[in-house]
Amino acid sequence: MATVDKLIAGARFLGFELSRGQVAQFEAYYRALIDWNRLINLTTITAYEDVQTKHFLDSLTVALATPDVREEPLNMIDVGTGAGLPGLPLKIAFPQLRLVLLEATAKRAAFLRSIAGLLELDGVEVVAGRAETVAHQPQYREHFALVLSRAVAALPALVELTLPFCAVGGRLVALKQADAMPEVDHAARAITLLGGRLRQVIAVNVPGLPPDRRLVVVDKVAPTPADYPRRPGVPAKRPLH
């Protein structure tokens, strides 16, 4: 198997070192991902080096938007996590984080529980359910200092699915591509309505990653009105504009 040099170098570029134990966890994560991917649809990216960079390293770029993940035991939720991205790579790199992985598909949730056990990760909860429903449950609503999402929905819908989880004073980080920039303008009203304020859009320039990556960072400045998110399917079908 190839080495994880690009992942190690990328983490170093971001300002932190991966230990041998963490590198071993990433390698075990990769092997489990490929094994499970033969049974259920987790990813179309399967080449070892591509998973290192386009999945694992890409996930770690969240540290550019919220440096306190490096030191603080933040409550974090990854909404629509799929194969555990970006939440699990961040948990491997920063073990003090407390992580909830939210995934609507039961088979993917089973993978997530398996991989969290395999990697012996403490402080990881897997929730099988839709964001539109789970966001109204008291134990999750406005509970998290950091809310993450990657490749889930266009931003006007995404903020409705994510900001209700974010505590006032917390932050949403959405991993996007450069061609999604018009989404930021289209989402302006939704962000305000749901209690957010756009903080910045960060261009990600990390060796080993495509040059089109962006982090959309939204601060939670007011509570989300109780009516949001709307019932399952509505945010995507009728996004707030």
Image (spheres, rainbow, N blue to C red):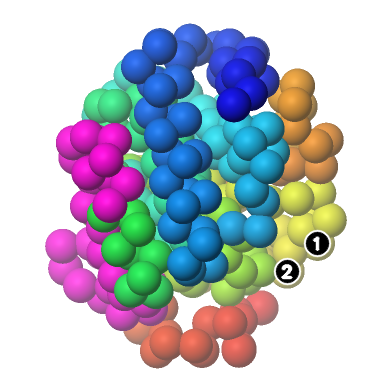
Q: Is residue 122 magenta?
A: yes
**Tags 2 and 1 touching, CB below 8 Å:** yes
Q: Quadrant of the N terminus?
A: top right
The residue positioned 42% from the left and 87% from the top of the image is 232
Q: Which residue is mark 1?
A: 182
Asked which secondary structure carries label 2, the reply is helix
Asked which secondary structure carries label 1, the reply is helix
Which x, y percent locates residue 30?
A: 49, 39
Q: Is residue 174 among the parts visible in the rendering?
A: yes
Which x, y percent locates residue 59?
A: 55, 38
Start-end of magenta stretch: 114-142
Q: Is residue 184 above or below residue 237?
A: above
Q: Nearer the viewer, residue 95 or 47?
A: 47
Mark sitting on residue 186 = 2
Could you tell me the amino acid type at mark 2? His
Q: Is residue 222 left or right of residue 215?
A: left
C-alpha separation, residue under disc 2 versus residue under disc 1 = 6 Å
Q: Nearer the viewer, residue 33 or 161?
A: 33
Could you tell me the amino acid type at mark 1? Pro
